[in-house]
Amino acid sequence: MTNNELEILASELPILDDKQDYKYFEEIAGIGSYYQVAWQKKLDGYIALYGTTPIELKNIDTSNDVFEDEEV
């Protein structure tokens, strides 16, 4: 399984150099309660890491953004 680098970098999930307290999918497959919470950066790509604690993502307030009408 290959992962698109741009999608990973734009995913808003942390990118870690080592796996820390997170688990590889093979370590928790079948448990039924896990969240994808981070990516581990490897020399040849990224590996999705999983945990049982959800992380809080930053919410950006876009309610004051102004979009001008564009002509086609």
Image: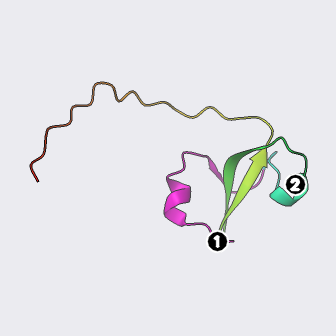
Question: What residue did someone put label 1 on?
Answer: 2
Q: Is residue 57 placed above or below 38 in the rendered structure?
A: above
Assess whether residue 45 is covered by the magenta stretch.
no
Q: Is residue 69 left or right of residue 5?
A: left
Quarter placement of the N terminus: bottom right
Q: What's the distance in space between the residues labelled 1 and 2, CA to CA?
A: 19 Å
Q: Residue at x 54, y 45 (%)?
A: 12
- Say which element carries label 2: loop
Residue 4, percent from left and from top:
55, 66
Q: Nearer the viewer, residue 62 or 32?
A: 32
Q: Is residue 72 left or right of residue 23?
A: left
Q: Main secondary structure of the magenta part?
A: loop
Q: Is residue 26 placed above or below 57 in the rendered structure?
A: below
Pointer 1 with pointer 2, Cβ within 8 A: no
Residue 25, percent from left and from top:
82, 57
Q: Residue at x 48, y 30 (%)?
A: 59
Colour setting: rainbow
Q: Which residues are magenta?
A: 1-19
Residue 63, percent from left and from top:
33, 25
Q: Is residue 1 placed above or below 55 in the rendered structure?
A: below
- Say which element carries label 1: loop
Q: Residues within 10 Å of mark 1 (few under 14, many from 20)?
A: few
Question: What residue did someone put label 2 on?
Answer: 29
Assess whether residue 8 is covered by the magenta stretch.
yes
Indicate the quadrant where residue 21 lies. Answer: top right
Quarter placement of the C terminus: bottom left
